[in-house]
Image (cartoon, rainbow, N blue to C red):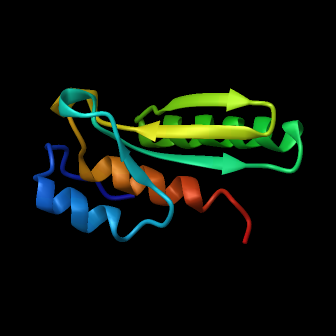
Amino acid sequence: MSALEVRALKPTEVIMALGQISGWHLSGDGENVAIEKTFDFAQHTHALLFVNSVGWLSEKLNHHPELVLTYRRCAVRWNTHDVHGLSRLDFEAATQTDALIPT
């Protein structure tokens, strides 16, 4: 993967990028703004496998999300602490997170 520019996106850039990823929404505000999506699974073991896959992805990207795991559901929340907001890296991470789910 090529290096992505890590800078805070302008609100118009955030809205444009958000329109290109399905099911993700804005969460929080100010420096705590993030993009978030909840994934549902048929079994708890599938949710656990997904969490492990997101962990592998986050190490590959050197960018780490907040994950909330419940019985058959996992919420994934991406933001860039270094820029106090959202960067292109968050949207790339979201796209790669979606790719972990078989269609």
Determine whether 5 is above or below 20 in the image. Answer: above
Task: Specify the quadrant that holds the C terminus.
Answer: bottom right
User: What x and y, as percent, mark residue 96?
Assistant: 51, 57
Report the side of 97 relative to 94 (left or right): right
Judging depth in this view, the residue of 60 and 52 nearest the camera is 52
Q: Residue at x 58, y 38 (%)?
A: 75
Front position in the image: 54 or 23: 23
Q: Nearer the viewer, residue 87 or 61?
A: 87
Q: Position of residue 86 (x, y in %)?
A: 24, 43
Please, is residue 76 above or below residue 67 in the view?
Answer: below
Q: Which residue appears at 37% of the width and 71% of the height?
A: 20
Q: Say which residue appears at 78% left-offset and 35% top-offset.
A: 48
Query: In this rendering, would 47 be left or right of 89?
Result: right
Q: Is residue 87 left or right of residue 44?
A: left
Task: Note whether 3 is above or below 56 in the view shown.
Answer: below
Residue sitting at 65 percent across and 56 percent down?
100
Q: Which quadrant does the N terminus fall into?
A: bottom left
Q: Position of residue 3 (x, y in %)?
A: 28, 52
Query: Of residues 88 and 20, which is closer to you in this image?
Result: 20
Question: How many badges with numbers are in the image?
Answer: 0
